[in-house]
Image (spheres, helix red, strand yellow):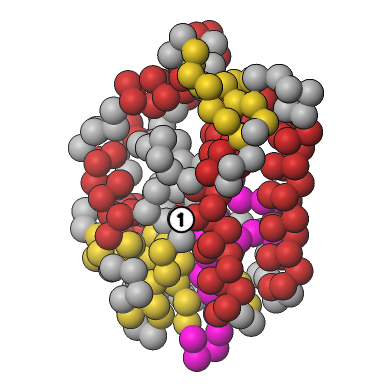
Amino acid sequence: MSLKALLRSLDMIDIKPKYLFLTHAHPDHCGSASILEKIYNLEVISSFKTARVLYDYARGKPDYSMIVNYFMKQGVPEEDLEFIMRDFFWWTREKCFPRRIVELMPQESWKGFSIIDAPGHCLGASCLYEPKNKILLAGDQIIDGITPHIGYEDDWDPQENPLRDYLDFIEKVKELSPGHIFSGHLNLISNVDRVICSIIEHHKTRYNKIISILSDGRELSTYEISRILFPNVLDAINLRLSISETMAHLQYLFYRGSLQQIIRNAKVYYRLN
Ligand SMILES: [Zn+2]
């Protein structure tokens, strides 16, 4: 349906695209790439890392056992884990990957744009910045009205600190001071400062809430904290996202020295330092 709408819109404005830049490997951002590639004979471009993620998916490589083990360590009960994994990466089973991707390295220039490494939301994500007109193509990194999901899910390495990486990225965007941001969802952003401030505030509020949950001295798992933060989440995708977003905040607080990690019976628990 979204493909039809896109084709109809391009037709209405009489545009035949030559290039398709994939900001990251999520299905709502590249699920129709192979079809568009064929229809318009266009060149598909992405960061080197996003291309690697997509090629791995295309080969059917994702190793779910690592994800299952990591979620189990976070205290996710078996029935919820089964529910989550049934839904996980359904789209990688569809053969929707481009034949060829031109791979760009961070800071490389491409047709007047620089490619900017954009960690936090998804492995390998990147943005394009056009310095002459101060335009940022931000994918899911910055959206007005929705706070982007922060937390790597596939291939999560326990050493990662995606929220810190994301907040560092936001500081970089502040320095670039773009006049306009084109997001992967919703509206064009012209009041960049307001949106950036609201994103920073949102994460502060979220991690302060975690500190207040643990302020009575309790030791809780990521899963238990996520159910307090997001009590009304019922569907598989949002359950998975709520756990991974909670992980990102806990990891950030742990590395900041605000929390301790306690390993008990192969599960990780957190308490205030
Ligand atoms: Zn995304």
Give the camera-side residue of 22 and 202.
202
Residue 132 in the image: above or below residue 58 = below
Quarter holding the C terminus is top right
Q: Three-letter amino acid code at disc 1?
A: Pro
What span is colored magenta in the figure? 131-150
| Circle 1 crowding by C-alpha within 10 Å: few under 14, some 14–19, many from 20 | many
Res 187 visible: yes
Residue 160 in the image: above or below residue 86 = below
Q: Which residue corresponds to the image point at 76% horizontal and 69% vertical from the top-left?
A: 194
- Majority SS type along the magenta span: loop
Q: Is residue 202 left or right of residue 96?
A: right
Residue 61 position by quadrant: top left
Residue 122 in the image: above or below residue 139 = above
| Cβ of mark 1 under 8 A from ligand 1 | no
**Residue 132: in magenta span:** yes
Give how far across and how far down residue 207 sits, in percent. Answer: 69, 42
Give how far across and how far down residue 51 sits, in percent. Answer: 28, 54
Give the camera-side residue of 180 and 185.
180
Residue 64 position by quadrant: top left
Residue located beneath label 1 in the image: 119
**Residue 2: in magenta span:** no
Residue 6 in the image: above or below residue 11 = above
Q: Secondary structure at mark 1?
A: loop
Q: Which residue corresponds to the image point at 53% horizontal and 71% vertical from the top-left?
A: 172
Q: Is residue 192 left or right of residue 262?
A: right
Q: Which residue corresponds to the image point at 35% horizontal and 75% vertical from the top-left?
A: 107
Res 32 visible: no
Q: Which residue corresponds to the image point at 61% horizontal and 50% vertical from the top-left?
A: 148
Give the camera-side residue of 54 and 209.
209
Give how far across and how far down residue 144 sits, in percent. Answer: 70, 60
